[in-house]
Structure formats: C-alpha cells, structure tokens
Amino acid sequence: MSVHANARKVTTHTLQEMKRAGEKITMLTAYDFSLAKLVDRGGVDVILVGDSASNVMAGRDTTVPMSLEHMIYHAQCVERAVDRALIVVDMPFGTYQGNSAIALESAIRIMKESGGHAVKLEGGAEIVESIQRILTAGIPVMGHLGLTPQSIYKFGTYTVRAKEEEEAAKLIADAKLLEEAGCFAIVLEKIPAHLAKQVSDALSIPTIGIGAGQDCDGQVLVLHDMLGITTDFSPRFLRRYLDLESQITGAVEQYCEDVRGGDFPNEEESY
Ligand code: KIV
C-alpha cells in the first residue's frame, strides 16, 4: 500500500512527492455525491470532475456542449462527498481558449462556487497564456495533452494521437512548456506508450496516463467505463473491473418481476 494512502488530504505536493518516491498516482472521474463518496473511500488519490460528464451523465456525443454551470454543479456534488482525494475540475470548452482574462474569471468561479482544489485545461502552447494567468491567482492547474476531446472537430476521430514524429515533437515541447508555466501534473491521453515514457522521464511533474501505457506516473479512467456501466465504449486501454450494466439491469428486472408477481413488498417489508 502507498505510504500516502493514509494521508489525511491529498494535495498537489503529495502528487509531486509520489513521483519522486516512484509511487503510482491513482485518478478516477466522479460527477455525483454518491459515487464520489465510494471512490474516495476506495482510496483514490485524485478525483477528476471530468467534462466526460457530457457523455456518461448527459448522454451527449462530445464534451463540447458542457458549460461552466454544468461543471460547477457536478463539482459541488463531488466536493460534498470527498474527505481525502484531491478534486480536479475540468474547465469546459469555450471558457479558457483565446482569452486569458476569461480563463481566469472561469477558473475563479469554479474554485469559489464548487470547492474544487484545482482545474484542468486541454492543450499546449495555444493556451499557455491562460494557464499562466490562472496560476497568478494561486489556482493549481493540471494540463492535458495528446487526445484532447474538446478538439474532436479538429481531429475528426478519437484515434491515437502523436504517432507521427512531428506531432510527437510538438507534444514533448508542449509538455515542457506546461511544466515551465507551473502546471502541477499533466494528463497524457491516448498516445504511444514509448512517447508517454519519454515525456514522463523528461518532466519533474507527474504524468497521468489514459491509454498511454504503464510508464506514466499515474493512471486515470472514466468511472462509468471501468465499472462497466457504459458498455458501448470499449477502447483497448479500458480495463473493466465490474459488469454493472448486467447487474443493474438484472436487479431492475427482478424488482419488476417481484412487484408484478405480488412478492414485493412482503409482510416484513410492510408496517
Ligand atoms: O473528462 C475526462 O474524463 C477526462 C479524462 C478522460 C482524463 O478528461
């Protein structure tokens, strides 16, 4: 077990110490009170209130429609449940690109209104000014490189990124830029494992991988995917730890049968 597993609260500094000590960082998403409580009890180091809520909570195809209000609402629900994990909140599309003053205002709203501990932004050199401005307010920033789902209409697909030399070189340069700017960690999404290792070795801040191989300093998965609640999404990197889809539909079927057959409620379940 990690020497940090009993730490009262995980901070950005804890994560940096974990990298120095060679301890893997665990991160999962959560969007609501009840599941966030279980995830925190399970001992995860970081809870990401991801804009993947757009897919798994709201049933949308992309993360693009998420608003600041949506993210603040989900982060408030999570914050009420969490005792130990560091809570990182995604800044949604359109709240930080191209205007660092708006980026700072959006990040301040997230911190004040949700109680989250840090924000995450997607992108490299194009958004570094926004990152620097947010950091001036003392708000910790997590970066996100590789497959950045808010840019889906630019990429056109959710396939592996940075397989070609030019894109890989830009990703390495962006990672260094984000570290120099002051990010406390960087998510690396869906890039070749050898590239993620190269980036992780080159940085003193932790990398957290999703579809980026085993040499990242930590790993993240979308909670609903790893619990087997969402089953229409099966990328190679996803390990399912439960099959909740069939367990939940099975329980619902049983309940319907019991009610329809007059078996529920029985005498002991009545007043
Ligand atoms: O929104 C999200 O869930 C994410 C993870 C995939 C890293 O950004």
Image (cartoon, grey):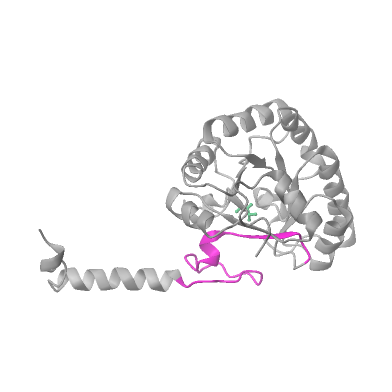
Query: Which of 164/22 is in front?
Result: 22
Q: Position of residue 9 (x, y in %)?
A: 61, 46
Query: Which of 65/132 is in front?
Result: 132
Classify 91 as above or below 207.
Answer: above
Query: Which of 69/216 is in front?
Result: 216
Residue occupying the point 15% across, 64% down: 269
Q: Which quadrant does the C terminus fall into?
A: bottom left
Q: Which quadrant does the N terminus fall into?
A: bottom right
Query: Which of 128/157 is in front?
Result: 128
| Image-quadrant location for residue 71 | top right
Q: Position of residue 196 (x, y in %)?
A: 81, 61
Q: Is residue 111 in the magenta section?
A: no
Is residue 119 shown to the viewer in this render? yes
- The dominant secondary structure in magenta is loop
Classify 266 as above or below 220.
Answer: below
Is residue 145 shown to the viewer in this render? no
| Image-quadrant location for residue 166 | bottom right
Q: Is residue 125 left or right of residue 42?
A: right
Residue occupying the point 64% across, 48% down: 10
Classify 135 as above or below 79.
Answer: above
Q: Is residue 181 left or right of residue 160?
A: right
Q: Position of residue 83 (x, y in %)?
A: 53, 46
Q: Position of residue 180 (x, y in %)?
A: 86, 41
Residue occupying the point 46% across, 49% down: 32
Residue occupying the point 72% across, 54% down: 155
Query: How many badges with numbers are in the image?
Result: 0
- Write the start and end of the magenta stretch as one range: 215-243
